[in-house]
Amino acid sequence: MKTNPSPVYFRSLSALHEAMGISAPLHPLISIIDYGETRFDPEIFENGTKSDFYKISFKTKFNGKIRYGQGYYDFENGGMSFVSPGQVLRMDNEEADYSGMSLHIHPDFIRPYSLLKKIKEYSFFSYSAAEALYLSEKEKQTIKDVFDNIQNELNERIDQFSQDVIISQIELLLTYSNRFYNRQFITRKSVNNNVLSKMEELLNDYFDHEKGINGLPTVEYLASQLNLTPRYLSDMLRHHTGQNAQQHIHDTLIEKAKEYLSESQFSVSETAYQLGFEHPQSFSKLFKKKTELTPNEYKQSLKKIE
């Protein structure tokens, strides 16, 4: 069978249900797909998928291991992942064999509600599949109950109140997910410490060897080196240290700047260029914001100490 070289793009739930080998959706803008009921050809999806829907996957059982950052972790109890409309999702072999369900929501379904704006504030929709939310047995039951409530509304009570009820359940699902991600950032402290150590090594190495050749280090650069998404890296650091990735970059940059400024052969402009700034004024502005001193004032303060 000849496969499509591009990701399969699903613009309707009917097309998605047909590709998955299941009956038509009960509602054109929202549905829950039970993977235990699907019958589809995996080759159709080998180049990935994207759709016009938000997708919230609840995987109750994995057979195998899932990549998490730079290592593999065994999460047989399953977990959750989140995909935004238009985002390409690839099914890796190590993730392909699982049981569970997924909730698909078209933005038009939530458009009349404040949830349309609020859902964009949940950063886990920008995480990768490798940064999934892993659940305890109690948490799994909590999530399953919400999925069941939504499915029951679709199955039995489609009336003038159904949309309001389902919206409230989606909001509850996202609130629980946010809470459980916060728990995960705390309980995976050893993994987070490892990421923080590697990030500090990357920053020190960048400032010591790049010498401004490639400009300032970015959050995207650090995340790619750590095999994480920028949003996940910043969220993890914020929970772990109180600062996001950009703030960590600035803190390391200021410490390096102090080193250069303490060496008399470096002028303020030379220091700025060494660190990757195109304009010394931008460096001076950031230095003043972080230290309450201009670079020249800092150099003068060092002379007084001597």
Image: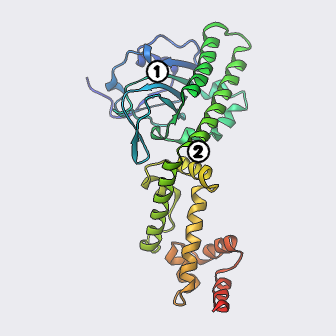
Q: Which residue is mark 2?
A: 186
Left or right: residue 47 compared with residue 265: left
User: How far separated are the C-alphas under marks 2 and 1?
Assistant: 37 Å
Q: Which residue is mark 1?
A: 16
Disc ID at residue 136:
none
The residue depicted at 51 percent of the width and 67 percent of the height is: 216
The residue depicted at 62 percent of the width and 11 percent of the height is: 152
Q: SS for tag 1?
A: helix
Image location of residue 25, percent across then percent down? 53, 14
Residue type at tag 2: Ile
Determine the residue located farthest toward the left in the rendered image: 1
Q: Nearer the viewer, residue 251 or 241?
A: 241
Say if 167 sits above or below 304 in the image. above
Q: SS for tag 2?
A: helix
Say if 190 sits above or below 260 in the image. above
Image location of residue 306, percent across then percent down? 63, 92
Q: Nearer the viewer, residue 286 or 263?
A: 263
Q: Earlier in the sequence, mark 2 or mark 1?
A: 1
The residue depicted at 55 percent of the width and 68 percent of the height is: 252
Determine the residue located farthest toward the top in the rendered image: 156
